[in-house]
């Protein structure tokens, strides 16, 4: 019995020490981006059933406390919502930037845009119709037609330039996307090795969640956890990351 009491006290001290360690970890990472608060999971140790020669089976009291592990106080639904929101925000921002460029090029609505040049062109034709046989209104029509043609040509050139700049930026984003995918695969390898050794995966999962949120913001990727502690990332229904394997993305479409 004295040995059982000592063992119970030892387990209680170990559980308390584990709680202090996790609390210190939480406090130390108070301002760490992406860190998820952790908590020690405990359960009561089952009592021993004594059996022996010439002895009636008896059951002793509990054997103290047992540390089952360290849990992340996370919400899978909220984490998925964060990635979905990041994906929508990234998509909306990209569209808004592209449309904003085109809007600035065409300068509409304003008195220097294409609609204003068309209005002056049609007005010149109306003046010509009101003064048939006169040379001056005809020359005005020709002048306004030249201005309109230059306006359309300049707008097209600026749109082509904006398209090229957008595509170049997209190629840089794809390079960043592939780099993030490689980092996720590397973390998956560490998580698989740590899980095989029975170590905690909490910090690795936090880092991976940050990377998958960036991938969602860039390209709308979807993260899927795997039973072995790794995670996969799907992009348009295809794997970008499958455990420790990666599949490179590339820019498609015309130049």
Image (cartoon, grey):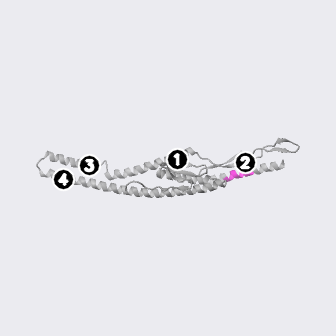
User: Residue 120: image x %, image y %?
Assistant: 22, 49
Task: Please give the residue where the numbered disc 2 appears in the rendered image.
Answer: 66
User: Residue 151: image x %, image y %?
Assistant: 27, 54
Earlier in the chain: of badge 1 and badge 2, it is 2
Using the image as rendered, state which of residue 71 and residue 254 is in the foreground: 254
**Spatial separation of the CA atoms under disc 4 and disc 2:** 92 Å
Residue drawn at point x = 24 percent, y = 52 percent: 148
Residue drawn at point x = 30 percent, y = 54 percent: 156
**Spatial separation of the CA atoms under disc 3 and disc 1:** 45 Å
Earlier in the chain: of badge 1 and badge 4, it is 1
Earlier in the chain: of badge 4 and badge 2, it is 2
The answer to whether marks 1 and 2 mark residues whose Cβ atoms lie closer than 8 Å is no
> Does the magenta run of residues contain 153?
no
Using the image as rendered, state which of residue 235 and residue 31 is in the foreground: 235
Using the image as rendered, state which of residue 119 and residue 162 is in the foreground: 162
**Spatial separation of the CA atoms under disc 1 and disc 4:** 58 Å
The answer to whether marks 4 and 2 mark residues whose Cβ atoms lie closer than 8 Å is no
- Closer to the camera: disc 3 or disc 2? 2
The answer to whether marks 3 and 1 mark residues whose Cβ atoms lie closer than 8 Å is no
The secondary element bearing badge 1 is classed as helix
Asked which quadrant contains residue 191, the reply is bottom right
The secondary element bearing badge 2 is classed as strand
Q: Residues within 10 Å of mark 2 (few under 14, many from 20)?
A: some
Is the magenta region chiefly helix, strand or loop?
helix
User: Residue 209: image x %, image y %?
Assistant: 55, 51
Res 223 seen here: yes
Q: Residues within 10 Å of mark 1 (few under 14, many from 20)?
A: some
The secondary element bearing badge 3 is classed as helix
Q: Which residues are magenta?
A: 12-21
């Amino acid at each position: 019995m004295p040995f059982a009491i000592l063992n119970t006290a030892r387990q209680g001290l170990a559980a308390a020490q584990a709680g202090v360690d996790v609390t210190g970890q939480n406090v130390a990472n108070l301002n760490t981006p992406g860190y998820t608060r952790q908590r020690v999971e405990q359960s009561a140790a089952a009592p021993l059933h004594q059996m022996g020669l010439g002895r009636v089976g008896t059951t002793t009291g509990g054997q103290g406390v047992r540390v089952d592990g360290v849990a992340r106080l996370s919400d899978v639904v909220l984490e998925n919502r964060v990635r979905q929101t990041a994906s929508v925000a990234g998509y909306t921002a990209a569209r808004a930037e592209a449309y904003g460029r085109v809007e600035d090029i065409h300068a509409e609505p304003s008195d220097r845009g294409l609609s204003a040049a068309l209005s002056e062109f049609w007005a010149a034709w109306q003046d010509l119709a009101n003064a048939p046989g006169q040379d001056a209104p005809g020359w005005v029509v020709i002048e306004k037609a030249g201005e309109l043609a230059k306006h359309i040509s300049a707008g097209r050139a600026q749109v082509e330039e904006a398209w090229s700049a957008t595509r170049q930026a997209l190629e840089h984003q794809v390079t960043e996307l592939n780099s993030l995918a490689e980092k996720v695969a590397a973390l998956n390898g560490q998580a698989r090795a740590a899980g095989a050794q029975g170590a905690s995966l909490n910090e690795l999962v936090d880092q991976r969640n940050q990377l998958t949120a960036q991938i969602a913001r860039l390209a709308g990727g979807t993260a899927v956890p795997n039973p072995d502690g790794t995670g996969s990332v799907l992009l348009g229904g295809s794997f970008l990351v499958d455990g420790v394997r990666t599949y490179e993305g590339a820019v498609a479409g015309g130049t």
